[in-house]
Image: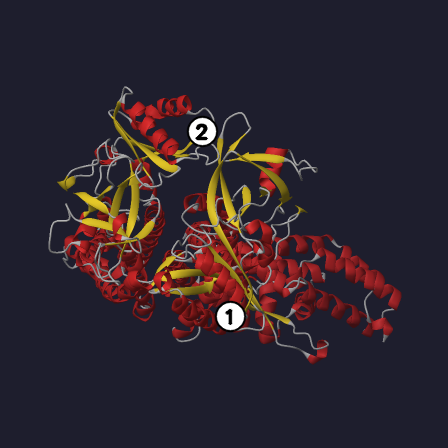
Amino acid sequence: MKDKRIHLGDLQQLTMLAVARLGDQAFGNAIQDELLNVSGREVSVSTVHVTLVRLENQNLVVSRKADHDPARGGKGKRFFELTPEGWEALKASRMAHLRMWEGVEPV
Amino acid sequence: MSGSRPPLTADWLLRAILPNPRAEDILDDFAHAYQKRLREGWSELRARVWYWGQVLAPDTFRLGYLLRARNRTVRKALEKGLSGRGMRSQKTLMDPLAQDVRYAFRAIRHSPGFALVVLLTLTLGIGANTAIFSVVNGIVLRPLPFPDAEHLMRVREVDRNSNNRNMGLSPPNFLDLREETSALVDVAAYRPTSATLTGGSAPERVFAIRVSSGFFELLGAQPAIGRSFISEEDVAGSDPVAIVSHGAWQRRFGEDPAILGKVMVLDGVSRTIVGVLPSGFRFAPGNPEVWLPQEFSERDLTLRGRHFLTGLARIRPDVELERAQEEMRAIWARMEDAYPDTNAGWGISAVPLLDSVIGSARTALLALLGSVVLVLLIACANVINLTLARADRSERETAIRSALGASRYRLLRQNLIEHLLLGLSGGALGLAGAYLALDHLLALFRNQLPRTDDVAMDGRVFLFTLVISAGIGVLTTLAVAVHQSRRNGTPRLSGAGTKEGTRVARGPIRGTFVVAEVALSLMLVVGTGLLLNSFLRLLQVDLGFRSENLLTGEISLPEARYQTDEERAFFFETLTDALERHRGVRSAGAVGMLPLTGSYTHVFTVPGAEQDQAWPAEDRLVTHGYFRTMEIPILTGRALEPTDDATAPPVVILNEVLAQQLFPNESAVGNRVKFFGASDDESWDVVGVAGNTRQFGIRAEAPPTLYRPHSQIRPPSSMAVVVRASGPPLDLVESVRQAVTRLDSELPIYSITTMEDLVSESLTSDRVLLLLLGLFGLIALMLGAVGIFGVMSYTVSQRTREIGVRIAVGGAPADVLMMVIRQGMKLVGLGIGLGLIGSVAVGRVFEGLLFEVSATDPTTLSAVVGLICLVALAACFLPARRAAAVDPLSSLREE
């Protein structure tokens, strides 16, 4: 069990949180905007997608193609959501952060 | 809104970098971001520069790489039937059909074991069918190689008194028929013969056919060089001429263009060559080298009772076959009234030439075709069974594909393409195999079947193979579709997909195939068994003579040099005497026609008998050494003596059958017999009764036979010499040749062989048929065993958990073994029952081929049932043993 723990990078954590915050509206541009508006991190479209693909490969995020969206010329958007493993990994990461902060004086 | 579109070149580049399933989504995001910046008031130029920067950023390339790697993984996962992790099936710009074909190739490549077994099965099944169909096509289905061949008929006289036996036309009857008919374009007549060709380095016997004028015209053939025969050449006395075959022109005359007018010496007669036949012309088996005119003698033209011609007729195109036959019967009725002495009791038969040529071969070919069709059905059942098992194993993959949006139609189409691919590959391999095997097959059949030269793989054969190959593909697809739809619609994604729980639903369809395979194999093996049984009986038939250590050969004296009776009688007398003095020779004799080589019939009667008392019998002219040499026993009276010559009173020996027919209530010896129609003064003394000998092959009972000393009345010019050797008979070949040459250096002895070979040759068609059916039976058994094994293995693997539980709660492995075997044998038993019913139909087809064996012979049936049970038991045993060896712990842990 021990070695199975997934270590999330900083951008991965932020992206997953953005996905979680957006709920059923988590698609590429929205995630990009959320990252910029909430955390102040400006990342390119490619970077967002690289991160998402890596998360998908680790089975932390899944995507599905929506049927079609008139706003996008009839094409369907690709939406992302966290898998149960994704939630677990995010929680574990948060716990690790909280534990590390314990005993550290707030600056 | 031209400004709202991102730069096209950049977009194109982006498409090139990113692989397909995601490219569109990401491009959308790019475009969205671009438009957002324009909305925020960016200038178009700035937005474009920004866009290019985004496209060319390192992360874009990283993304392309990641997505490609991901696609590969997903593809592999899909192929292995593992989880695709929610991946959408690859949607490319490729034509969906091409994509499905590629998919099918991949699927086949990824289960090589399955593909190998299926291809092997199909190759065997389709190959055997293609090969046999090629033969049937060439012999039965193809028209004869003559224009409007369906209008050609073979005309013969039939002996109504002896079971409508086909006999030839006599020359006067032939000429009358030709004269009177109006329904026929023309009638011609031919008779196979042979002649001694001299003038080369050694005298040589060549196959020839004598034909009437109009023969080639009737067939629609013209000599390639020169002319055909004219009506003057139908009667003796015209200038001797000959036509040579294209082969003889090439071989013997080096394709000499100035061949017309050249001379060849045949039977001592110099004949002028007047024509060369075209290269494709084929009429009789054995391809005669020389064609001669009929040259009927005056005597020929008066004897209505000598049936040595075969008639060939062409019906007028506007006349129906039945009407032509009717007209011929009417003409015959008039001829019967006009010449009651010779024509009473006779009839005429006119059958389409093709039917006449195929003759009895039809039954054998039908039996063979039926057998390979059974093999194909078994192969088909096996392939479907294997495919179903595989479909179950790849159930999850199908589920994933369907969850990802693949429609039922698409899945069906992919299945169809895959199975068509397998079916057609098997068909191609089968076709190649049949092509390679066909020559060997024809070598087996040569001399046993007519028209083997016409057998070739033509368009019809290709179409046949294509149709059965594609048919198997479609059938398999349908079976899989039905199988899957039965299982409550959608396939399941859950992990238990390949484990038990669905067994009950799947059992029946698989069981059906096992039952069918067993039934079909049983039918086929019953056919083989019946033939084998019949063949063994044929080998045990007492021929009436001893065939071991007998050498035979034939000699024909040219009439030009042996004109008198004395010369001919003297030659054979001297030759057999000389041979008897040779070391290694126990005795020697000669006979007009050897047993098993043909028929020479005359009608005999007893002096003073009623007008209608006539008995047809085989007429055999023999030297006095013949009975001794052949070891034909003399039952009463005496054998022939050297003193029974032209100067002595004429004597005959009857065989038992004829003695019984002519003299049912008294001893034949001391009585007299004569030719039917001859005067009482021309009768002969019966001096002995000999044992019966089979004359028309091993199957036919010994016919009534009459033996006359060759030297007494019209000694024959052709005889077969028989030599009884004290050692291996073939050691004597050279001595016999030398003995002939010492008497006449221009005389060949031909058809040298042993009597054992003649006997064995007369069984060749039985042997070939048995060999092929044995082969098909073996294939059927093998395929059947593979089928049973496959299904039982599958069942065991489905029940591993249940078996594990049984063993865990104390079940003995032996009980498990028995349980699996019992389950398998239940299906086998059902198959045997159905197969036995089917074998009644098989028996009907085989009836005509069997000798002294009933089509429902209980010994054969029980032996075959036993064999099938044994094979089935073996096929059940391996899976059963695996079931008995199930480790309960690991089988339970698997869940």
Near mark 2 (Cα within 10 A), the count class, few <14, some 14-19 or many ≥20, is many
**Residue B771, placed above or below residue B816:** above
Residue A74 placement, left or right of B598: right
The quarter of the displayed image where residue B485 is located: bottom left
Q: Where in the figure is residue B187, as x and y percent of width and height?
A: 53, 61
Q: Which mark is residue B561?
A: none
Judged by depth in the image, the label closer to the viewer, 2 or 1, is 2
Residue at point 28%, 48% (across, down):
B682
Of marks 2 and 1, which one's residue comes earlier in the chain? 1
Residue B227 placement, left or right of B828: right
Residue at point 58%, 40% (across, down):
B247
* Residue situated furthest front in the rendering: B681
Which residue does the numbered mark 2 point to in the structure image? B747
Residues B631 and A2: in front is B631
Which residue does the numbered mark 1 point to in the structure image? B403
Cα distance, mark 2 to mark 1?
A: 89 Å
Q: How many numbered badges does the structure rendering display? A: 2
The answer to whether residue B845 shows anywhere in this view is yes
Q: Where in the figure is residue B821, as x and y percent of width and height?
A: 21, 57
Q: Where in the figure is residue A46, as x and y percent of width and height?
A: 70, 59
Give the residue type at disc 2: Leu
